[in-house]
Image (tube, coloured by chain):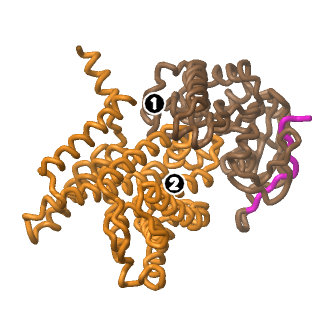
Chain colours: A brown, B orange
Amino acid sequence: MPLLEVTGMGVDFGGLRALSDFEITIEEGELVGLIGPNGAGKTTAFNLLTGVYEPTEGEIKLQGISIGGKKPYYINNLGIARTFQNIRLFKGLSVIENVKTAFHASMSYGLISGIFRLPKFWREEKAIHDEALELLDVFGMADMADANAGNLPYGKQRQLEIARALATHPKLLLLDEPAAGMNPSETQLLMDTIQLIRERFKIAILLIEHDMKLVMGICQRMVVLDYGMVIATGRPEEIKNNPRVIEAYLGE
Amino acid sequence: MKLNIALILVLFGVLTLLMEIGILNNFHRGLLVLVCINVILAVSLNLSAGFLGQLVLGHAAFMAVGAYTSAILSSRLGISGLGGFVFVLLAGGFAAALAGIVIGVPALRLRGDYVAIVTLGFGLIVQSILLNLGITGGADGLLGIPRLANFNVAFFTMVIVVGMLVALVRSRHGRAMIAIREDEIAAEASGVPTTWYKILGFTIAAFFAGIAGGLFAHRMSVLVPETFSFVYSIELLVIVVLGGMGSFTGAVVAAVVLTLLPELLREFGDFRMLTYSVLLVAMMIFRPKGLMGSYEFSIMQIVSKIKKKG
């Protein structure tokens, strides 16, 4: 059974057809790229997969469980985490608090344990503090744990957002234009980070990206969107030579 | 923790001593009870407005629900002891929490300013219900409530409430609430059931407002609906904003200062309200984030700083 199986997914906003008949299958541990010109519906697809919007039609299955139209937190708890095109950190909080917030679902102590500081509270808080530091260490950010998230440099903010997404223990990670606004050396660092995540956490990644060098370089498979429709799927070299893809990007 | 408890007991001891030797008279004592009540109201409103980030304009209405519930219960049941008083206070708190759920569930499913409108409407509804219901005494007010809320009870209730809320905010539940204030969409995407936590925080805030109402009723011994007007809700919001949204220290300090200030400015006579307003405006110009911002006073931090230096 594939990790994620989407069939015939579409959505209307009022009279506007933003996405139609979207299909994608992702196997465990796979790295898939989602590309397309601006306004093609890539982020809309992400928002449908993560429950921000409810699909008008179609089926989304994560490990055989139907998740279409479910609440975002519920979908996250089942194993899909994401980052955002325009970074959404908890800017007023410290780096480590950002990560700890995402451990919410992996903790189980109740309100009473929290308010009266029962042993379960201390045990779980200690455990996630260590786990959060460990996760930050993977990104080389352990020494910034107490810094204010809003004050981090841009590249680090992107990394923190990925770290926060990983803290929810996802099976599938959706990255929405992680290289946007990065310089070449930051992009290189990001590519290394993505490789590292795959090796270390053994999770599948679906990546929206405009930087062709980045996507072609690391993705195993790609899906191309244009005007809300899938126009091509295949390995990077097939996509590169696909006439419909070239037309979508360069015009006739 | 031990240091905090010691500090609180010292403060309590000093205040009691001042009362015993007569430096603080009965008027001051009454004022201090009012300070404690306003502190409870301010820290509870800070949970929903400062930490959860919801604009609540009807906090006094939750206080009213608690005040009338506990007052009616204690008059009907003939409550006189401390045990009975704690019972009616809790009953008032639960009644207010119930009201919080009833209006929180529809209002908090929405994002943005709807909460402000709904809580504003709720405040007006509560006031007109209190005016028109037989059991509340209508416009004549509810009279003859036993005066059970002395300084000791008010002080320790305040300490317990502040302690519980500080602990709550520094748990995974509090973290979830702060995340909602920071970015609701990101919080939900990080696995936090945001609607649930908004309702939870809002209900807890209402619960403690109800407790404060119970104390108020058993201090004044008379309740009239006008007390719990929209203006009072705004005054409480001013305290929270002035103290610093998201700082309990700020809420406590601002509640103490703004409760005592009108009394201290009494000698200015007619200029009293003007001075008060000018102070508020000046405050917002020079410290727009509030007295404390999001800073929390911690005796442990100060001690460790001094140790480092020494």
Q: Secondary structure at mark 2?
A: helix
Q: Chain of mark 2?
A: B
Q: Chain of mark 1?
A: A
Q: Is residue B258 visible?
A: yes
- The circle on residue B204 is 2
Indicate left or right for A4 with A117 as reference.
right
Residue at image point 37% right, 49% down: B158
Magenta-span inclusion, residue B218: no
Magenta-span inclusion, residue A8: yes
Residue at image point 69% right, 48% down: A72
Query: Which quarter of the figure is the C terminus of chain B placed in?
Result: top left
Query: Which quarter of the figure is the N terminus of chain B placed in?
Result: top left
Q: Which residues are magenta?
A: A1-12
Q: Is residue A40 visible?
A: no
Residue at image point 59% right, 26% down: A123
Callout 2 amino acid: Ile
Q: Quadrant of residue B106?
A: bottom right
A206 lies above or below A59:
above
